[in-house]
Amino acid sequence: MKNKMKNILKTKKIAQEIFFFDKLESTQIKARELAEEKVVNGSIVITDNQTNGIGTHDRKWHSEEGKNITFTLIIYPKCDIKDLDGITIDIAKCMIQAIYEECGHNMEIKFPNDIMCNGKKMGGILTQIVTSGKKIRYLLIGIGINVNGKEFPIEIQDIATSLEKEFGKEFSREDIVSNFCSKFETYCISKKII
C-alpha cells in the first residue's frame, strides 16, 4: 500500500512522509508518539491491520485486516486554535468528495464525525488537538473508512457497512486516501493551517 500511494500522491505537503505498518494497535496512538518526536508536518501513519482502533468517546473501531482504510495525519498547524473550529466537518467533506471520485456515489455526514452510506455507518473521523497553554502543539486526524470489508462484529452488523457491501465491487483504498490528501491539502492551504 505504501509504495502504491507514493506513486499516485499529488500532494506537496500532506503525506510526504508515510509511516506504514503491516499491523498496529492504533494509528492514533502511534501518531501521537511520532508527533512528540517532531516528524515532518503532514506525515501520515497508516496500517493494513489495526487491532484496537479508537473511535469517539473511546469506542472501539473495528476494521477487517487488509480491506479498509485506517490512518492518522499529523499536522503542526500554523494557525490559532479558533481557526480549527468546524475542522472535523470539513475533513468529512474532503473525504466524501474523495470517495465520490472513486465510486461515483454520494455519502452523507452524520454530525459531527460519521460518514454514512444508505443510512449505515461507513466511516468515522477522530480529531484531537494537543495544546500547550493557548498554543497548538499538534493536530491528529484519525480516519477509518470501511472500503472492501464485509465482515462486521454481530453487535454492529445492522448499523455498519462498506463500499463493497453497498455497491458489490472492490474499490482502491490507495486512490481514496490519495484523493483525500489532495483535497485536504488544498483546504489546509486555503485556511492557512499548514
Image (tube, grey):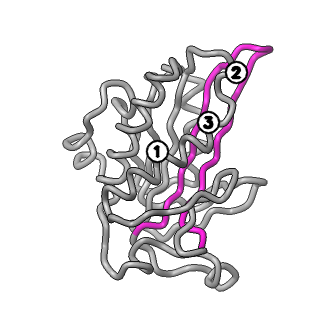
Magenta region includes residue 142 = yes
Q: Around disc 2, counting alpha carbons within 10 Å, would you say few (fewer than 14), some (14 to 19), or many (20 or more)?
A: few
Most common secondary structure along the magenta stretch: strand
**Number of callouts:** 3
Mark 3 vs 2, N-terminal side: 2
Identify the residue at image location x=68%, y=37%.
128
Residue position for label 2: 81
Which amino acid, by three-letter code, is at mark 1?
Cys
Compared across the picture, whether 162 is left or right of 12 comes to right
The quarter of the displayed image where residue 65 is located: bottom left
Name, please, the residue furthest toward the left: 7
Q: Around disc 3, counting alpha carbons within 10 Å, would you say few (fewer than 14), some (14 to 19), or many (20 or more)?
A: some
The secondary structure type at the circle numbered 3 is helix
Marks 2 and 1, how far apart in space? Answer: 20 Å
Where in the figure is residue 186, as x and y percent of width and height?
A: 40, 30
Residue position for label 3: 87
Q: Considering only vertical position in the picture, is 147 above or below 38?
A: below
The secondary structure type at the circle numbered 1 is helix
The quarter of the displayed image where residue 148 is located: bottom left
Marks 1 and 3, how far apart in space? Answer: 10 Å
Which amino acid, by three-letter code, is at mark 2?
Ile
Which amino acid, by three-letter code, is at mark 3?
Ile
